[in-house]
Amino acid sequence: MCGANKKSFWRNIPDQIIRLAVVTVLLVGGAGAIYILLPASLTSTKLHRELTVTAETEKPIRFAGSTLCGDCHQIEYEKKIVGYHKSLSCETCHGAAAAHVDDPMAATPFVPREREVCPVCHEYDPSRPTGFPQINPTIHNPLQSCANCHNPHDPVPPTTPQECSACHAGIMRTKSVSSHALIACTTCHKVPEQHKIFPRIVRATKPESRDFCGTCHSQGSSERSAPKIDLSRHEERYVCWQCHYPHLPAERL
Amino acid sequence: MKRRDLLKNLIVFLPVSRSFFSCAAQASGTAPIQGYDPDNHLYGMGIEVSKCIGCGKCIEACKTENNVPQEPFFCRTWVERYIVRNDKSVAVETVRTTQKETRAAPNEKDILRSFFVPKLCNQCEHPPCVQVCPVGATFQTRDGVVLVDSDRCIGCRYCIQACPFGARYLHPEKRTADKCTFCYHRVVKGLLPACVEVCPTQARIFGDLKSKASQLVRFQRMNNVHVLKPHLNTEPKVYYSDLDGVVT
Amino acid sequence: MNSELTHRLSELLEQVTGFIYPNEIEIHWSILIVVYPYVTGLVAGAFILASLVKVFNVVEVRPTYRLSLLTALAFLLIAPLPLVLHLGRPERAFEIFLSPNLSSAMAMFGFVYAWYLMGILLLEIWFEYRRDLIVWARQKRFPMSFLYRVLALFSTDISDKAVELDSRAAKIITMIGIPSAFLLHGYVGFIFGSVKANPWWSSVLMPIVFLMSAIVSGIALVTLLYMIITPLRGKPIDIRCLDKITSYLFYAVIVDFALEGLDFIHRLYESEESVKILSALIDQKLFISVLVMQVVLGMIVPLIMLVAVKAGRLNEDLRKLFYFTSCILIQIGIFSMRWNVVIGGQLFSKSFRGLMTYKMEVVGVEGLLMAAALLIAPFLVLAVLLKLLPAWKEAEEH
């Protein structure tokens, strides 16, 4: 009974469906067979990633790293690590040197002697952070090689800079367009000679009181071109630079 | 009954593939170096914006170390110069590395503030590039670096479209996607990435986020850090200190 | 390094306005990727039109039923070509089947495509034509008779019961087919709409907009084909059929127009950080292709024409002229829409500070000629299909 039912069930499947089913089975089976026969290198994501990590790890190294250079170049290295260039890697200026480390004779690193090299970092650029040593290459001892005056492994200025703008370019830039343009820095700041050699240890002074500004700006001052105020009544609870930036006084803070 | 069989047939038509079930593990890769366990590391980079002098040494070093085409259209890392003018308008340009080209000296009197910002692949925690790669050729390693399998990449460039930071390019010879690897071949051997190695002002700080003593963790402790495009929730692992709001 | 590429990119660099990230100079998805969603859209649209007959019993549209099915098939067969050709490594295209990344929308392409081609379109065509194939196999001489027998999978049963079953099967497949057609093209929209890095693409409406524009373009294409082929066969055009199709077309255009308008207004009103660069994009790069081609020529003018037909009692010839013109304009409009999405989305920097330029190659693999060839190819395939599987024979016999 049950068997007969089953038989009629199979007979009842329409002809079209059986034909399509055969095609489907062939297609799916074929695709499945191909997939199974393919090597794991084509289908395994995990394997592929392991291979990539290995391949990536095995890529050649071009920059040897700064710790190696001192083994042979002791003089330069020891000089460098105490000077202003102590944070520089040797390969920053000398270029990739792994080949030189492997075989010192086969490859010689680049030795920058041209004047064009140092300004890559030290040419004045208004986007550079204040305090970073910068020069104007067109007027800074033209035609001379930088190394003539500065030892690149221990760069210090050969002569003490005379102009404040050598280091304080940003402030000079601001002051030069202000009404204080013609006032020398030393009018307001006392600059000990040692400040130019140890700028962060020996500091220049700053004005400390309202009266200092008053020497020019109070009523009765002999300075004729400066605008005058009554020191005793003009915002007496504040010091001047809380509202006026001395290097650009027209601008209210 | 007939109808049910028909549906059965249709379902069988769906190509059944093994990898449907061996569902792609996002992170994988075995230890490539003796004694190196990628699970113990998670790499990131800090960038101290106020230290960058825009010299472009990092760009040159990267191209040398990683065989990046020399042309300026293909960069694994680059440096942007931002100039905010007095009228609050912002001008941006990419720092050029060829020394012969004169720098475009901006009119100084017009500058409100100006600075350089180094850029590279952010090695995101949730990388959109990995999400969209149709063949799984780009993936995250266990130590947190996004790599591209150039033997598998089909060059569809969906990842380039999906990267919000423009960090990817199509390698002109390999015809596959390429990007910064944090110099993976260097860092697994304890070396610094080439750009960090040559940076003269230490504006770039490389380190391991899983090591408390690392330079990077110290950098994060000492600075106000920010990432690029945080609203996209890709969670970059390149951290910028005191990043200006105009940087995009 | 390829000096031709360097030269091309240097030229493009000069045309950049504002700031772009250095890697952004190369426009990666070229004209071929414009062709791809356009062609897939026609597939989905043509299929939807066919489903009107089967599922919704719109009798008037019956003369276009087989034509729509064959059009869908012809375009579907060509659809993967632009994708494969644009790959950097086309020889690796098969990997998308071998190691698909399940989180990638694009990885699903192979499966959606295979499902739609094998599971829906071929099945439906087979059931629709099976009886005819058997008849033709008996009528024709050797090579053709054998081919028809193979195509009929050697079935011979043309009893009323069997033909009845064919018809019911086709109906069921169409019912599954409608969501599948939605899936096929909605999925293409999703590929773009899910890129959060790109504000021009990133939109939940993208799949729906793609879908509606697909329906619009597919219906318009079948209408055009019907209006061209019927006179060529020396038969009269069934104006009732045309009236009915174009009224569906009219509704589809309205919905499409409303969706795209909503998307536009929404962006403008929300005015997110990208709004400035997107305005500049439309203003400087896409003015002609968005406003003139896509909106005015591709939508407003056809809408006016279709309204005119409905409102004014125009005579038959004028109606045909209006239908024909508006269908052509709609094709131009939808192609422009694909262009604006694909190319437009790559013309602005993700820094939101600059615009790039796309310079189309003419002869290269990703060039204009290739795109033109890929757009003509489906028509050639369709011609072969129509020769092999005549779409109107049955109607003539009755």
Image (cartoon, rainbow, N blue to C red):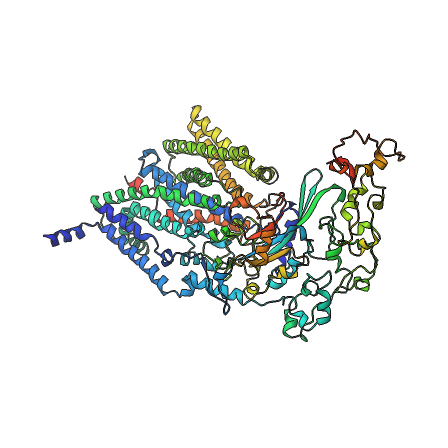
**Left or right of C310 on screen, residue A187:** right
Quadrant occupied by the C terminus of chain C? top left
Q: Is residue B17 above or below residue C309?
A: below
Q: Quadrant of the N terminus of chain C?
A: bottom right
Occupied quadrant, residue A98: bottom right
> What residue is drawn where x is 33% and y is 62%?
A33
Number of labels in the image equals 0
x then y, percent, for residue A221: 88, 34
Task: Identify which residue is drawn at 71% across, 71% down.
Answer: A74
The reply to whether residue C366 is in sight is yes
> Which residue is pictured at 69% across the width and 69% down the height?
A109
Residue C368 lies, with reference to residue B39, above or below; the image says above
Res A214 → quadrant: top right
Question: Looking at this rendering, what residue extends furthest in the top direction?
Answer: C312
Residue at image coords 90%, 34%? A222
Q: Examine the rendered structure and indicate whether residue C204 appears above or below residue A163.
A: above
Q: Position of residue A197 (x, y in %)?
A: 80, 56
Horizontal side of B61 relative to C102 (left or right) equals right
Where's residue A127, x and y in %? Answer: 71, 49
